[in-house]
Image: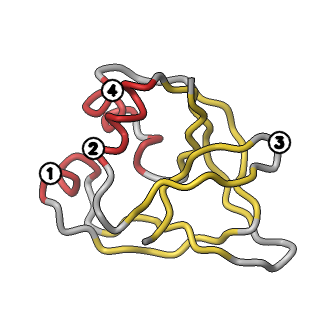
């Protein structure tokens, strides 16, 4: 099982149903040491599914108050691969510390 932190479109029920085949329950948490930015998405499928060409982007920020609120999902190997397939090349999957003390995968800017 894998922990995946989402601060963007993977929290949307319609995106989850398309990517995973069902809605996925999650737990509120936050990534520390980061802030939100934006990235323009060009993949028409992702734009149609998410409803927007502008998506949030996780950016490293070492200021003490930097954190991004979102949701942690527990995923199987297959679900993590499905999330990888959904995310566009502007993102890379990295491990980050969470406010809860756990570590999770997250998609951050390349």
Q: Which residue is mark 4?
A: 20
Q: Secondary structure at mark 4?
A: helix
Q: Is residue 52 above or below residue 3?
A: below
Name the image quarter holding the C terminus.
bottom left
Q: Which residue is mark 1?
A: 45
| Residue 38 x/y as whole percent | 44, 74
* Mark 1 neighbour class, 10 Å CA radius: few under 14, some 14 to 19, many 20 or more: few
User: Total number of numbered labels?
Assistant: 4
Mark 2 → mark 3, Cα distance in angstroms: 27 Å
Instruction: Tell me if 20 is positioned left or right of 76 in this view.
Output: left
Mark 2 → mark 1, Cα distance in angstroms: 12 Å
Q: Do the CB atoms of the residues marked 3 and 1 lie less than 8 Å apart? A: no
Residue at image x 59%, y 29%?
26
Residue at image x 67%, y 60%?
68
Q: Which is more N-terminal, label 1 or label 2?
A: 1
Q: Which residue is mark 3?
A: 100
Mark 1 → mark 4, Cα distance in angstroms: 15 Å
């Amino acid at each position: 099982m894998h922990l995946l932190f989402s601060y963007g479109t993977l929290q949307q029920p319609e995106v989850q149903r398309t990517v995973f085949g069902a809605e996925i329950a999650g737990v509120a948490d936050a990534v520390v040491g980061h802030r939100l930015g934006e990235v323009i998405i060009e993949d028409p499928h992702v734009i149609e599914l998410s409803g927007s060409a502008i998506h949030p982007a996780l950016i490293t920020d070492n200021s003490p108050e930097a954190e991004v609120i979102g949701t942690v999902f527990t995923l199987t190997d297959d679900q993590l691969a499905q999330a990888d397939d959904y995310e566009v090349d502007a993102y890379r999957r990295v491990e980050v510390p969470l406010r809860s003390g756990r570590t999770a995968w997250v998609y951050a800017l390349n």
